[in-house]
């Protein structure tokens, strides 16, 4: 039986076990870089979530701010349960596919 890996930041470890090679807790995927918190927009793709959050962008000419959105595709390990509308924490990793370079490490919706 494999032991759970630590991912480098304070997150709660998942209660389930999985056999996914791209799981930061039970596989060999190493995490580094940026950490974001956002809302899951869609989970229709296989083992993938689209995570979205809003940010304010300053327009210098008009001295105002406008809302902009950022959407990122993130890998969902089988040991973490995620559905549409959940608030999740994602962290950067090596490229998992052409468009996925982030992994869901914690579901903060309880």
Image (tube, rainbow, N blue to C red):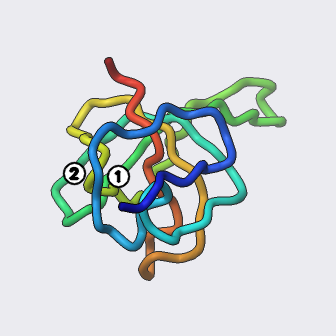
Q: Position of residue 15 (x, y in %)?
A: 32, 37
Judged from the image, the secondary structure of the residue bearing numbered disc 2 is loop
**Please, which residue is most extreme toward the top here?**
110
Q: Secondary structure at mark 1?
A: strand
Name the one closer to the observer, 65 or 93: 93
Numbered circles on residues, count: 2
Can residue 73 be seen from the camera position used here?
no
Decide: is 85 above or below 43. above
**CA gap, disc 1 and disc 2:** 7 Å
Q: What is the x, y in percent for residue 63?
A: 80, 25
Label 1 packing within 10 angstroms: few (<14), some (14-19), many (20+): some
* Residue beneath the point at 31% across and 53% down: 49
- Rendered location of residue 22, percent (x, y): 42, 69
Locate the N terminus by quadrant.
bottom left
Q: Which residue occupies 46% across, 76% down?
A: 96
Residue drawn at x 69%, y 51% is 34
103 sits to left or right of 60: left
CB under 8 Å between discs 1 and 2: yes
Residue 103: tell me if it is visible.
Answer: yes
Q: Which residue position is annotated with label 1?
A: 50
């Amino acid at each position: 039986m494999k032991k759970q890996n630590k991912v480098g930041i304070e997150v709660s470890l998942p209660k389930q076990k999985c056999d996914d090679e791209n799981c930061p807790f039970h596989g060999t995927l190493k995490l580094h870089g940026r950490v974001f918190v956002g809302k899951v927009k869609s989970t229709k793709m296989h083992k993938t979530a689209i995570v979205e959050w809003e940010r304010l962008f300053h327009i210098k000419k008009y001295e105002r701010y406008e809302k902009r959105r950022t959407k990122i595709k993130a890998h969902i390990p089988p040991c973490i349960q995620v559905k549409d509308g959940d608030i999740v924490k994602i962290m950067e990793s090596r490229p998992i596919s052409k468009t996925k370079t982030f992994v869901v490490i914690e579901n903060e919706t309880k």
